[in-house]
Image (spheres, rainbow, N blue to C red):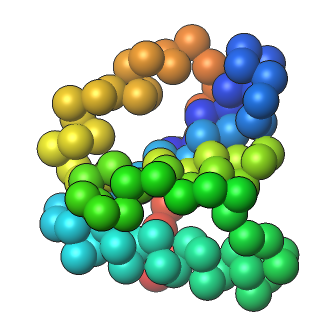
Amino acid sequence: MILDVGDIIGITDAFVVCSASNTRQVRTIVDEVQHRLRDLADAKPRSIEGLDGSTWVLLDYGDIVVHVFLAETREYYGLERLWSDVPRETLVPEA
């Protein structure tokens, strides 16, 4: 899911929020995001938080902040609920 938070917080344009069912999958998603953004846009994260526990990993790319959650952690913190008043787009996985 993409949350368009730019008009509200001003330090980033969007949050990309996704989740996985176990910490190994969280780490795989993080690795794939880094790989694709590096290859497609020559982008590297400004900072990475949460890799140790891999229940909520944050990748800060400046204009975009990617949140990769363990499913139960995503439900607990409820970013979509917290940012319920911002425009959003749901992403459909590639086949």
Q: Nearer the viewer, residue 51 or 6?
A: 51
Q: Residue at x 83, y 75 (%)?
A: 41
Q: Nearer the viewer, residue 27 or 87?
A: 27
Residue 20 visible somewhere in the drawing: no
The vertical placement of 14 against 50, above or below, is: above
Residue 12 visible somewhere in the drawing: yes
Residue 22 location in percent, x, y? 17, 66
Residue 72 appears left or right of 34: left
Q: Residue at x 54, y 58 (%)?
A: 48
The vertical placement of 95 against 23, above or below, is: below
**Dividing the picture into quarters, in which one does residue 43 lie?**
bottom right
Total count of labels: 0
**Dividing the picture into quarters, in which one does residue 3 lie?**
top right
Residue 54 location in percent, x, y? 28, 61
Residue 22 appears left or right of 14: left
Q: Residue at x 57, y 12 (%)?
A: 85
Residue 63 appears left or right of 18: right
The vertical placement of 7 against 3, above or below, is: above
Q: Residue at x 49, y 16 (%)?
A: 84
Residue 57 location in percent, x, y? 41, 55
Residue 60 appears left or right of 57: right
